[in-house]
Image: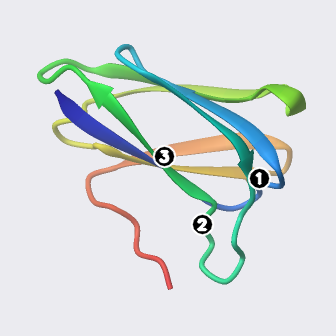
Amino acid sequence: MTTIQVYLEEGFDHDRVVVTSSDSQHTEPDVTTRHQVGLASVVELDSAPGAPTTVRIALPERGLTTELEIDPATTPYVRVNVTDGALRAVPQPAPPMFA
């Protein structure tokens, strides 16, 4: 198995967040951004090696979802922010740096 790390960053305010991939699902019941570091939570998902994986992030109570296909071998990190009433997710090859 390969691990995908999903960084829930800015814009979260006591949100229930559901993060799924083809191989796993994780629910965070109360996610709030810590403004000192710009990070709310980090979710780790399992993924089968060698194949692209669809990652879906949802804030059900706000009616927000986003979905993206990533290759865990090249972009195993995903940064997620709530901006202007929408979820924005960006895959990255390296983990983000925080203060």
Residue at the image point whose x is 69% and y is 62% from the top: 10
Measuring from the top left, give residue 50's x and y in whole percent: 11, 21
Q: Quadrant of the N terminus?
A: top left
Is there CB contact under 8 Å for labels 3 and 2? no
Residue at the image point whose x is 26% and y is 38% from the top: 3
The dot on residue 83 is 1
Q: How many marks?
A: 3
The amino acid beneath tag 2 is Leu
Check the image and name the residue furthest to the front. Answer: 29
Bin the neighbour count of mark 3 within 10 Å (Cα to Cα): few under 14, some 14-19, many 20 and up: some
Query: For mark 2, what is the residue?
Result: 39
- The answer, for residue 17, to whether it is visible in the render is yes
Secondary structure beneath dot 1 equals strand
The amino acid beneath tag 3 is Val
Measuring from the top left, give residue 40's x and y in whole percent: 63, 60
Earlier in the chain: of badge 2 and badge 1, it is 2
Measuring from the top left, give residue 5's x and y in whole percent: 37, 46
Q: Is residue 21 left or right of residue 48?
A: right
Bin the neighbour count of mark 1 within 10 Å (Cα to Cα): few under 14, some 14-19, many 20 and up: few
Secondary structure beneath dot 3 equals strand
The dot on residue 2 is none
Q: Quadrant of residue 29?
A: top right
- Disc 2 or disc 1, which is closer to the eye? 2
Is there CB contact under 8 Å for labels 3 and 1? no
Q: Is residue 55 left or right of residue 75?
A: right
Residue at the image point whose x is 27% and y is 43% from the top: 75
The amino acid beneath tag 1 is Thr
Query: For mark 3, what is the residue?
Result: 90
